[in-house]
Image (cartoon, helix red, strand yellow):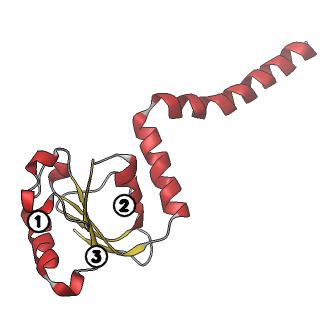
């Protein structure tokens, strides 16, 4: 009887260890949350970085785009890095495609999570992913 109980306990311990690893391997959303949490805890806020997102990455339009156009033309913000979450780069106006301080990342990617966790300014016309957490020293402009 003792051997069966020990085997059952050992089986539960192995399951406790392996289940999160299986989930990480099989569940993309779980991996995205994990990468965001890693960046959030290990990376510092980038003071001159702005992340923009319009309609969950469908376009460069609306209020985020209006703010972006103002900032990109203003010499006061020349040293800022502008990051757009965009699904399809073909919707990006050609005048912004090869600028050294403008980057484009796919929404819900590791790069997106990195900027979501580290950009000081976040400009969005909808919502960020459900796992988003606001850090101190950060400004949300939604």
Left or right: 108 as drawn, with respect to 89: right
Q: N-terminal of the two: label 3 or label 1?
A: 1
**Residue 66: where, in percent of width, then height?**
8, 70
Residue 115: image tag = 2
Name the residue: 92% across, 16% down: 2
Say few, some or many: other residues with alpha carbon within 10 Å of mark 3 (under 14 / 14 to 19 / 20 or more): some
The N terminus is located in which quarter? top right
Q: N-terminal of the two: label 3 or label 2?
A: 3
Distance from Cα at disc 1 to Cα at disc 2 = 18 Å
Residue 98: image tag = none
**Residue 122: where, in percent of width, then height?**
28, 68
Say few, some or many: other residues with alpha carbon within 10 Å of mark 1 (under 14 / 14 to 19 / 20 or more): some
Residue 80: image tag = 3
Distance from Cα at disc 3 to Cα at disc 1 = 16 Å
Task: Provide the secondary structure element on which disc 3 rests.
Answer: loop
Q: Are marks 3 and 1 in contact (CB under 8 Å)?
A: no
Left or right: 136 as drawn, with respect to 53: right
Q: N-terminal of the two: label 1 or label 2?
A: 1
Task: Provide the secondary structure element on which disc 2 rests.
Answer: helix
How many tags in the picture? 3
Check disc 1 and report the residue beneath it. 65
Q: Return the residue nearer the eye: 75 or 131.
A: 75
The C terminus is located in which quarter? bottom left
Name the residue: 15% across, 70% down: 68
Q: Marks 3 and 2: which is nearer the front?
A: 3
């Amino acid at each position: 009887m003792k051997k069966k109980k020990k085997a059952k306990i050992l089986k539960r311990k192995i399951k406790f260890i392996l289940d999160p690893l299986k989930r990480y391997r099989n569940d993309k959303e779980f991996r995205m949350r994990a990468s965001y949490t890693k960046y959030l805890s290990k990376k510092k806020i980038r003071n001159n970085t702005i992340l923009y997102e319009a309609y969950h990455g469908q376009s460069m339009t609306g209020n985020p785009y209006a703010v972006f156009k103002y900032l990109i033309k203003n010499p006061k913000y020349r040293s800022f890095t502008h990051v757009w979450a965009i699904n399809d780069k073909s919707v990006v106006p050609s005048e912004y495609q090869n600028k050294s301080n403008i980057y484009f990342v796919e929404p819900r990617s590791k790069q997106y999570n990195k900027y979501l966790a580290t950009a000081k300014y976040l400009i969005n016309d909808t919502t960020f992913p459900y796992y988003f957490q606001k850090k101190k020293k950060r400004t949300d402009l939604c």
